[in-house]
Image: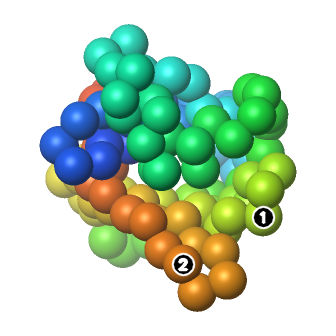
Amino acid sequence: MNMIVLMTAGAPLAILGLSTPVAPQRDCIFIIHPQTTSAVFESKEGKIVFPDRPTEYRCSYAKTKRGADIAFINQNDWRFEVRIGRGDEGSWTASLAGETVSGRAFSPFGDGK
């Protein structure tokens, strides 16, 4: 799994790109999804995912019986957790100081790695 699409309110928000090879510790970066609209980009979720500038994050990557779990903290201290199930679909959550935003996530190319 090298690319995960994050959705918010049914609209594409971002692509989470993960480095290869698969290891417990990987690097990841958010990429603007080609179908992201300016309204989504300027939304609360958009400002959390894209707070300032593109930044690589060290992320944990764990394969589980249900799929894969990815976690990292962005440059504004939001903790992201992405869970992808065996059917290449799942969810994402970002939390900071009791505040949480979330949405749907999926891996468009499956778990090839």
Q: In which quadrant of the rendered view does residue 24 lie?
A: bottom right
Amino acid residing under circle 2? Glu
Give the x, y percent position of residue 92: 41, 60
Q: Nearer the viewer, residue 10 or 15?
A: 10
Asked if disc 2 and disc 1 are in contact, CB closer than 8 Å, the reply is no
Q: Nearer the viewer, residue 103 or 91?
A: 103
Q: Which mark is residue 23?
A: none
| Residue at 82% over, 51% down | 75
Vertically, is 16 above or below 96? above
Q: Which mark is residue 77?
A: 1
Vertically, is 112 above or below 37? below
Characterize the local packing of mark 2: few (<14), some (14-19) or many (20 or more) Cα atoms within 10 angstroms: few
Give the x, y percent position of residue 45: 46, 50
- Sequence-first tag of 2 and 1: 1
Q: For mark 2, what is the residue?
A: 99
Looking at the image, residue 93 sits to the left or right of residue 75; the answer is: left
> Furthest-bottom residue in view?
98
Q: Nearer the viewer, mark 2 or mark 1?
A: 2
Characterize the local packing of mark 1: few (<14), some (14-19) or many (20 or more) Cα atoms within 10 angstroms: few
Can residue 38 be seen here?
Answer: yes
Vertically, is 28 above or below 65? above
Separation of disc 2 and disc 1 at Cα?
12 Å
